[in-house]
Amino acid sequence: MRNADTYKSLDVWNDAMLLTEIVYDLIKKLPEEEDRGLSDQMRRAAVSIASNIAEGEARNPNEPGKFAWYLSVASGSRSELETQLQICVRVKYFTDSDISTAMDLLRKIGLGIKSLISKNKTDK
């Protein structure tokens, strides 16, 4: 039987948690008019990445494909957040330098998710 906290040992989950902290700090720099717009979207996307990794890992291991499905959702949220950060640069809310750490983590998380999806397919 799998431990319910197994996801906490995953590097990709820990990277996603760190990314969420960074995004919350970046959001503080956005103009007030973005409080209910872009910042809200960015928060939800960042939280979704770590949350879906955790939920997928904690699901019943006897449900084939569930973990991969949640990883796919996390991957979509990762791409969404990457796009939102790039929008912030294009509209000059942030510079490339402001988001460089977040972008590096997004790339690392993307690779980690792909690796877990591959591993999940071979474990069946």
Image: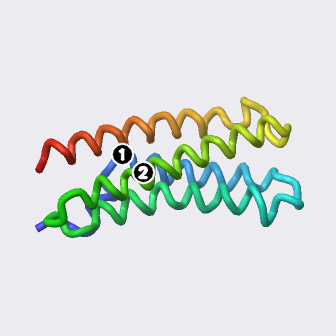
| Residue that appears at 68% across and 37% down | 99
Going by the numbered disc 1, the residue's amino acid type is Asp
Given contact means CB atoms under 8 Å apart, are the residues at marks 1 and 2 in contact? yes
* Quadrant where the N terminus is found in the figure: bottom left
Q: Which colour scheme is used?
A: rainbow
Q: Mark 2 points at which residue?
A: 14
Is residue 2 in view from this perspective?
no
Going by the numbered disc 2, the residue's amino acid type is Asn
Residue 66 rendering spot, x and y as whole percentages: 27, 61
> How many residues crowd mark 1 within 10 Å: few (<14), some (14–19), many (20+)?
few
Q: Name the residue under label 1.
A: 11
Which labelled disc corresponds to residue 118? none
- Residue 121 located left or right of residue 36: left
| Quarter holding residue 46 | bottom right
| Residue that appears at 89% across and 60% down | 33
> Is residue 102 positioned above or below 59 on the image?
above
